[in-house]
Image (cartoon, helix red, strand yellow):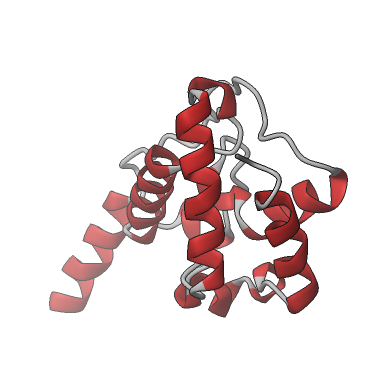
Amino acid sequence: MILGVTGLILLGIQFVPVDRRPPLNDGIVPGPDPVLEVFRRSCFDCHSNQSVWPWYGFIAPVSWLVEDHILEARSNLNFTRWDIYDEDEQAELVEDIWDEIDLGRMPPDYYLILHPSANLGEHDREIIDEWASQFP
């Protein structure tokens, strides 16, 4: 009985919608191709309007957690809405980007478990560090 009710609940929540439509892009973060490649591989799924939803992002209730994580990440930094930030904000964001990477907080460990290709190797870190050092 309990198993049947649990199954019905799990089936029913699959119909609770998650908005996966990408919002508008207002200008991608500037940088040479190697920098953008690293950002696309390691950051864009959460910090851009070009998120690629993983298979588990289509199964409730996990889909709700993924959506919440992406919305929170975009509110902190959105690489595809770079033009909404003024010059001071951009400089601060660049500093924050490097600090988070340098301290090993981004990409987060829990993300890397299912997305090992997002791991930032030493060469990737050098690319981002060089890019970040060009901002005032």
Q: Residue at x 75, y 57 (%)?
A: 130
81 versus 59 height, above or below: above
Taking the image as shown, residue 10 lies to the left or right of residue 67, namely left
Q: Nearer the viewer, residue 38 or 1?
A: 38
Residue located farthest toward the left when viewing the structure as drawn: 2
> Front-most of 130 and 4?
130
Q: Position of residue 35 (x, y in %)?
A: 77, 51
Q: Residue at x 67, y 30 (%)?
A: 28
Quadrant assignment, res 2? bottom left
On screen, residue 78 versus residue 42, left or right, reads left
Residue 59 at x, y percent in the picture: 43, 57
Q: Position of residue 103 (x, y in %)?
A: 48, 74
* Residue 49 position (above or below residue 120): above
Which residue does the image show at 49% across and 37% down from the upper left?
20
State the image quarter where residue 51 is shown. Answer: top right
* Looking at the image, residue 83 lies above or below residue 135: above
* Quadrant where the C terminus is found in the figure: top right
Residue 69 at what x, y percent from top left? 38, 53
